[in-house]
Amino acid sequence: MHLGQRRRGSGSAAANPAGVPAGKWAQLEAVVGSDSRIKLIAKDFVEHFENRLSAMDGKAMIVVMSRRIAVALYREIVALRPEWHADDDEKGALKIVMTGSPKARSAQR
């Protein structure tokens, strides 16, 4: 099935790119992006990344399922390692890259 196609029998006209009906996608996003899970992932990421850096230089990339989760995870990582953040794009070690519309951006600042 092509990512843009609607699954047969989904019962929902609106579906995400994976073909999951919108209501189920929202439920899954709520579980995946719960505050307790975001805190755990941020803690695990920071610990793993710092351990890896002790052995070799490198970069990391985290992929999440929604803009809301991306912003929440960024904020949680910055709470653990404030020195990784900078308002200046040329500074700081942590960046967030996402697609979106101008309307969506104001809610994520």
Image: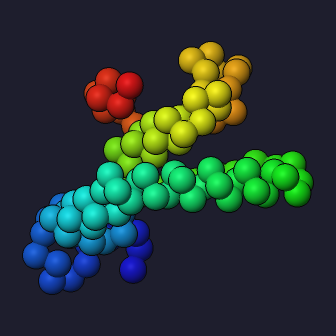
Residue 70, how many percent across, how many down?
44, 45
Q: Residue at the bottom extreme?
A: 9
Q: Residue at the right extreme?
A: 56
Q: Quadrant of residue 67?
A: top left
Depth check: give the residue in front, 100 or 91: 91
Residue 93, how many percent across, how many down?
69, 33
Q: Is residue 70 visible?
A: no
Depth check: give the residue in front, 37 or 108: 37
Above or below, 2 against 47 in this view is: below
Residue 103, how many percent across, how many down?
29, 27
Q: In the visual, does 76 lie left or right of 24? A: right
Q: Residue at the left extreme?
A: 11
Residue that appears at 34% across and 63% down: 32
Q: Quadrant of residue 23?
A: bottom left
Residue that appears at 29% across and 29% down: 107
Residue that appears at 49% across and 58% down: 41
Q: In the visual, does 52 lie left or right of 25? A: right
Depth check: give the residue in front, 94 or 104: 94
Residue that appears at 35% across and 31% down: 108
Above or below, 107 against 64 in this view is: above
